Image (tube, rainbow, N blue to C red):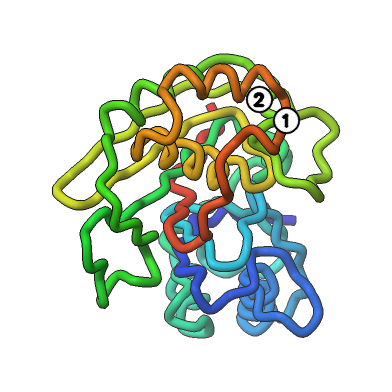
Amino acid sequence: MRNIKIIIEYDGKDWGGWQKQPNKLNIQGEIERAIEEITGEKVQLIASGRTDAGVHALAQVANFKIEKDIPVEKIPYALNSKLKKSIRIISAEEVDEKFHSRYTCKRKTYKYIINNSLQGTAIYRNLQYHFPEKLDEEKMNEGIKYLIGEHDFKSFKASGTSSKSSVRIIYNANVKREGEIVTIELTGNGFLYNMVRIIAGTLVDVGIGKIKPEDVKTILEAKDRLKAGKTLPPTGLYLVDVKYE
């Protein structure tokens, strides 16, 4: 049995999220269908993590096992010919049979993109969150630094999560501005349900002066979701990178 690892890029706008679910367009099911068409085999596609409806990915990692002796370098071309244009297989490689996209993952990087212009954008409206009130990215960057390290992120966890523990490690975190675009980026060993979007909403409160940068530390220590900011829409969220070493 061959274990195939693929890197996937997708625009989440038209999809009901990664996970297979009845009566909803889903990315996992779409790719599994394409794999079956080219190999004749039903597979279980395992991702590094599930993304919600509307969330995008630049480099989602997934793996599946097949018997068919198709050259691995041809897999991206074959799959892309069967997939909708909003999903692209960037690369494929054969890996050790023990490789598991989810369980062997060491760290992930997410970014949240905010269009901070007055009028927003027509072209990128489904790829950025529009927030017209001026943001102070320097204060936001001060606030996000309190999240670096190992903490209980219960304040930034949405209800409905299946995770038993809300303790996570954030390795790197920063907020940057380029023109009218403000980008929030977080690298950690894992993320809770809606964690990045809640952090982004809290940092927006910092950026408009509703709360101070040091209040992020107080919110973190409170372990109370009601203390944090609102959950921003999935439109601006991207899974950027997944590391296994």
Q: Residue at x 22, y 62 (%)?
A: 118
Task: Note whether 107 is above or below 99 in the view shown.
Answer: above
Q: Which mark is residue 224?
A: 1
The type of residue carrying mark 1 is Asp
Q: Quadrant of the N terminus?
A: bottom right
Q: Residue furthest left?
A: 179
- Provide the secondary structure element on which disc 1 rests: loop
Towards the viewer: 149 or 106: 149
Instruction: Classify 10 Å Cα crowding around label 2: few (below 14), some (14-19), many (20 and above).
Output: some
Q: Which mark is residue 168?
A: 2
Q: Is residue 74 visible?
A: yes
Q: Position of residue 92 (x, y in %)?
A: 49, 57
Q: Which mark is residue 100?
A: none
Q: Residue at x 53, y 84 (%)?
A: 82
Q: Residue at x 50, y 38 (%)?
A: 202
Q: Position of residue 40 (x, y in %)?
A: 72, 81
